[in-house]
Image (cartoon, rainbow, N blue to C red):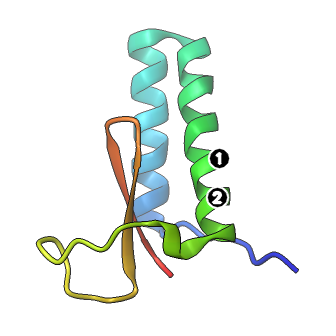
Amino acid sequence: MTTAYRLTPKAREGFLRIAFYVEDTFGPTVADQVVDSFLNAFELLRDKPHMGHQREDLTIDDCVRLWSVGPTLEAYRI
């Protein structure tokens, strides 16, 4: 059984802001590609949550990992 992932309200807001910014700046085709990249990363990290990197310079919480999607750094909790 695969567990679901959940975005916090702040993460959801940031995700939508990125999507709308990219659409306004580069058009819907590029925005769709960016959204797909994020969704693929969410699913990858849901299935393999330890793939992300720990960054002690950003947090000392052992359960927080980071993953790059394009120029964006996703922070998530295992």
Q: In this view, does 34 lie to the left or right of 59?
A: right
| Crowd rating for badge 1 (residues with CA inside 10 Å; few <14, some 14–19, many 20+) | few
Query: In the picture, residue 77 is in which quadrant?
Result: bottom left
Return the x and y of residue 60 as percentages of the image width and height: 20, 86
Q: Is residue 43 left or right of residue 54?
A: right
| Crowd rating for badge 2 (residues with CA inside 10 Å; few <14, some 14–19, many 20+) | few
- Comparing 9 with 3, the one in front is 3
- Comparing 15 with 54, the one in front is 54
Q: In this view, does 74 lie above or below 38?
A: below
Amino acid carrying label 2: it is Leu
Q: Is residue 55 left or right of residue 78?
A: left
Q: Mark 1: which secondary structure?
A: helix
**Disc 2: which residue:** 44
Q: Which quadrant: the N terminus?
A: bottom right
Q: Residue at x 47, y 29 (%)?
A: 20
- Comparing 30 with 13, the one in front is 30
Return the x and y of residue 48 as percentages of the image width and height: 62, 70
Disc number placed over residue 40 in the picture, else none: 1
Q: Say whether marks 1 and 2 touch (CB < 8 Å).
A: yes
